[in-house]
Amino acid sequence: MKRLPSLAWRLITHRTLLRLMGMGLGVVFIYASLDKIAHPDRFADVVREYDMLPLIFINGFALMMPAVEVVTGVTLVLGLWRRAAGLLASALCAAFLVAIAQADLRGLKVECGCFDVSGMSATQASWGLFVRDIGLLAASALVWRKG
Amino acid sequence: MRRRVLLSWAGGLARRFPHVIRAAALVGIAFICAALTNAANPLGIRWTPSPDGRIGLPRVFEKRLPEVNARQALEMLRSGKAIFVDSRDAKDYQDNHIPGALNIPMREWNTAWPKMRHRLPKTRTLLLYCYGGKCGLSTRMAKRLLELGYQKPVILEYGWKEWTEARYPTVSPLPPEKKER
């Protein structure tokens, strides 16, 4: 009975699987950053709707966050500094989780701003997204701790 | 002496948590990337709000978004110089709005815009309003309109709040009993 969890754990933390996981995460992060980099003004609007940051920081955050996403993504895809990139990916996912949870709890009707910021009827922040982000956070944390 | 202690402490930290230092370096690289891409982007924004306090306003649009106060807006309404556009949610528009205003709920832009675009000539002055001075929906709509080639979007500075506080005319299309449902 004791062997089964350890076998599963070994499988999950297998070097090849971790590399593939890192590459997959990297592709997701790069894809997520593209529209935000092209439309920083619209992403700033989305960030504002979450109502978490003082107004003075919103533009800077809207410029920095997609850049961190793309640098993290490229680093993960190339397999360089994988643990550092995993740490950043975990921090980003944790921040997304907090943002979505507080929006849902406060009843804010906000767009997710996850991948598409050009369409105004993009995915809305919801508990479904929360679950998806938990999956991404788990994968990022594995790459960070075991990568 | 103190400097040496600090350096050795930092060195120890870097040896112990190299990935944390590398993550900080990646953030630094991201900052350079953000600065370069934003400078090259025609829709680039300032790192802080624009001089008139607007969030997420592309630099190219900064001088193309004039604001009017409620009194000026009333004159425009009376003279018919502008088409009024209400960017608030549909239910708030149905409750009450400025006479003659068209409703394009900014939060439902993709569905609302195609239905209304034929009523908005590109050369006319469009007076946009939302809930108040900081609601941001009219700025978002003005950005979209400028991108689409509209030449004269104008923003009612303190929006619906200023208009109603000045007790200027409003219309409520639904009778009170229907509003309650």
Image (cartoon, coloured by chain):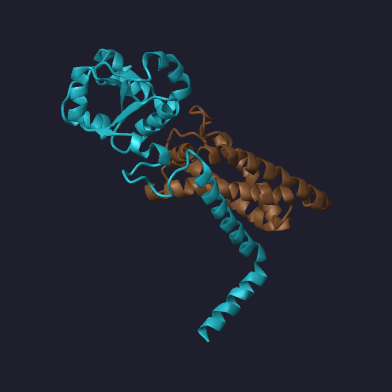
Chain colours: A brown, B cyan
* Residue B31 pos. (x, y %): 54, 54
Q: Is residue A142 above or below residue A111?
A: below
Task: Look at the image and tell me whether residue A63 can be seen.
Answer: yes
Q: Is residue A1 visible?
A: no
- Identity of the residue drawn at 81% across and 49% down: A16
Q: Position of residue A136 (x, y in %)?
A: 64, 44
Front-lying residue, A144 or B145:
B145
Residue B105 in picture, x, y percent from top left = 39, 24
Between residue B170 and residue A128, name the one nearer to us: B170
* Quarter of the image that includes the C terminus of chain A: bottom right
A57 vs B168, left or right, is right
Residue at 52% across, 36% down: A112
Residue visible at 39% across and 29% down?
Answer: B141
Question: Relative to B124, is A83 on the left or the right?
Answer: right
Total residue callouts: 0
Of B56 and A113, nearer the camera is B56
Q: Extreme bottom residue here?
A: B1
Residue B15 locus on image (x, y percent): 67, 71
Question: Which residue is at the front of the view, A132 or B172?
Answer: B172
